[in-house]
Amino acid sequence: MKGGVGKTTVAINIAHYIAEKLNKRVLIIDVDPQFNATQCLMNDDDYIEHLQKGQDTILSVFQNDITTEISTVTGAAKRKSKELSDIHTVNISKNLFLLPGNLNLYQLEMAAGAGRENRLRNFLASKSEEFDFVIIDTPPTPSVWMTSALIASNYYLIAVKPDPLSMTGIDLLKAIVSQRTDNYALTIKCIGIILNMVEDHTIVYKDACSFLTKEKWRKDLVFEKHIPKRTKIAREQTSNRFILDLDDNDAKRALSSIVNELMDRINGKKTK
């Protein structure tokens, strides 16, 4: 429910670790109109070339009619929806793939069509044999894009910064997801809460831990390890580098522990 908590950092680094260390095929879907995940995974020149060639973005999934797309790269153009099975992803590395984001999602939201929120789920169904895991980077606040991600997913993961504003957003998010779950008859579950940008031994961090342990449902969801606050993590990811690429053993060990715990939770080996 709050920007700036590092959800994109968590999403892309978990995806990269699973692809590199677990040798699984992972697709990242950037459904946030601000397309931060795309900026972390593609450099500006490659992304502009991608758009100029008319290649697929998340916009290709949600267009279910003929629309006028306005782009600072290609100008105004009429675009017709594609068959979902014909939408192609970008190969970032050996096992890591991306469906890039697109600023024009804002335009579609103003003219949402019936059933549009189901198209992401249908797209993933068409690609079910291609990937072992799909990680969707969502916008922080409620929208048709958040709803579409919830509809398409088995689990949702909460990334949170240990500060008072971010902490209070957890309960609100839980209420909003519950509402969507009821409205769309979903079976999605929260797989956990990951603390990000953590400074150990600070009062803010201790207060965050105290808040998280007050309610059993929150305490049970918190991952044992957290991602430490590192300026270079944020700085280097804009240069298309990941935590595994950095000379920071503490951050690497934390990420490894988080992914292993995530896999255990998904496979039902660890329940709290």
Image (cartoon, rainbow, N blue to C red):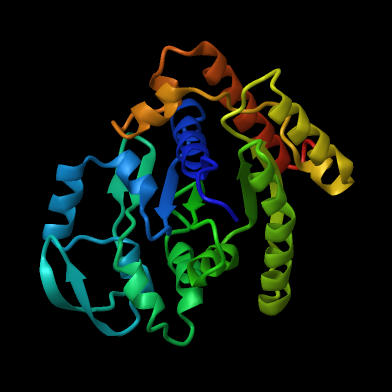
Identify the residue at image location x=71%, y=72%. Answer: 179
Identify the residue at image location x=69%, y=42%. Answer: 164
Which percent across, then down, holds residue 248?
48, 13
Which of 31/175 is in front? 175
Q: How many marks?
A: 0
Which of 260/222 is in front? 222
Res 264 → quadrant: top right
Assign the C terminus to one quadrant of the image. top right
- The answer, for residue 84, to whether it is visible in the render is no
Assign the N terminus to one quadrant of the image. bottom right
Rendered position, 27 above or below 138: above
State the residue lying farthest toward the bottom.
114
Rendered position, 230 above or below 79: above
Which percent across, then down, holds residue 11?
50, 42
Which percent across, then down, holds residue 135?
50, 49
- The answer, for residue 162, to whether it is visible in the render is yes
In the image, taking residue 232 as reference, residue 135 lies left or right, namely right
Res 271 → quadrant: top right
Identify the residue at image location x=29%, y=58%. Answer: 88
Rendered position, 3 above or below 60: above
In the image, taking residue 190 as reference, residue 256 lies left or right, namely left
Identify the residue at image location x=63%, y=57%. Answer: 154
Rendered position, 21 above or below 157: above
Which percent across, then down, holds residue 87?
30, 64
